[in-house]
Image (cartoon, rainbow, N blue to C red):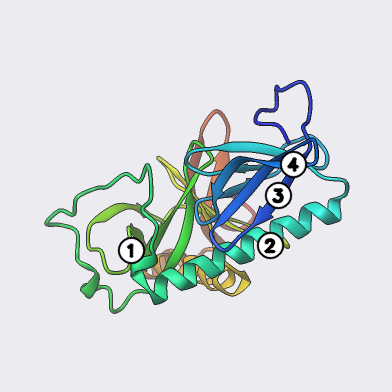
Amino acid sequence: MKESENDPEWKSTWIELGATVLSTFRVEEKINVPGIFLNVVECVVHRPETPLVLGLQDTTNSFFLRFSSEVEIKKWMSSIKSTKIECWKREEEDPSLKIKRKGIRHKEATNTTPPLNLFKDAIETGFLLKYEVTNLCNRYWFVLRDQTLYYYLSEYCENLIGLMEIANAMIRTNESEDSFMIEVVGKRETLQLEAADSVDYRSWHRSLHTARLNMRKSTKSPERMEETNQRGVLTSFGRTETNYMFILNNHVL
């Protein structure tokens, strides 16, 4: 283990994964000395470019671990993921167990922000992890209604943390054995989200695309569509990413 990628050498470390805490112990003269502890609920796991290395980080601490094989890395990633999901389930069943989050930015609800009881016709609701610039993540309650994605501190809190219009956004997905990532790329910002499992991931993926498709259907021009072979929103990549409406008509784009 080492606390930074720039550290010159690796140190022998004993790791224990508990119900809510990932503990590390320095191995010194056959005695395990307590080291760094991570909050499992807030823990972010990432893979640096160095082979067989795993990076772990919460809102307070971070360190890197080097394993003997790829099998060992995947086993630990899967165990941490499963433990995190179990923590979420316990918190939902008993709110008194909820761990106070650090670094969450609160945004007061305004008169133009509808409270949660008006989201009965929402396309999709549920918890997702939102990754921040610092590679840390927070867990928010997301609500997709029409072509707007809202997120709140919890399903019982009406104070809005943020929102994003997805009508012209690009939806990127990356599903792997241990990760269920969804990236929503808009004109001004990008949301990096992660679902808890493959079921939530596919449900949100389908709902986001359905919301964008419904917007396009509601804004179609029947007269122009009859003359058009194909139309839709695409992103042009250059110095900046820009969304345009493309129309293919008689071999002309």
Q: Position of residue 147 (x, y in %)?
A: 36, 63
Give the residue displayed 34% in from the left and 74% down from the top.
122
Residue located beneath label 3 in the image: 15
**Above-or-below relation of 177 to 110:** below
Mark 2–mark 3 distance (CA, rounded to whole Å)? 12 Å
Which callout, 4 or 2, points to the residue nearer the camera? 4
Label 1: how many Cα within 10 Å (few below 14, some 14–19, many 20+) = some
Q: Classify residue 216 by image quadrant.
A: bottom left
**Above-or-below relation of 114 to 68:** below
Residue nearer the viewer, 38 or 178? 38
Residue nearer the viewer, 168 or 85? 85
Q: Name which residue type carries label 4.
A: Ile
Which callout, 4 or 3, points to the residue nearer the camera? 4
Residue 177 in the figure: left or right of residue 216: right
Residue located beneath label 1 in the image: 154
Q: Are marks 4 and 2 in contact (CB under 8 Å)?
A: no
Q: Position of residue 176 (x, y in %)?
A: 71, 60
Residue nearer the viewer, 243 or 89? 89
Regarding residue 220, the answer to whether it shows in the image is no
Mark 1–mark 4 distance (CA, rounded to whole Å)? 43 Å
Question: Which numbered disc, 3 or 1, marks the residue that appears first in the sequence?
Answer: 3
Residue nearer the viewer, 176 or 101? 101
Question: Which numbered disc, 4 or 3, marks the residue that appears first in the sequence?
Answer: 3
Residue 249 in the figure: left or right of residue 10: left
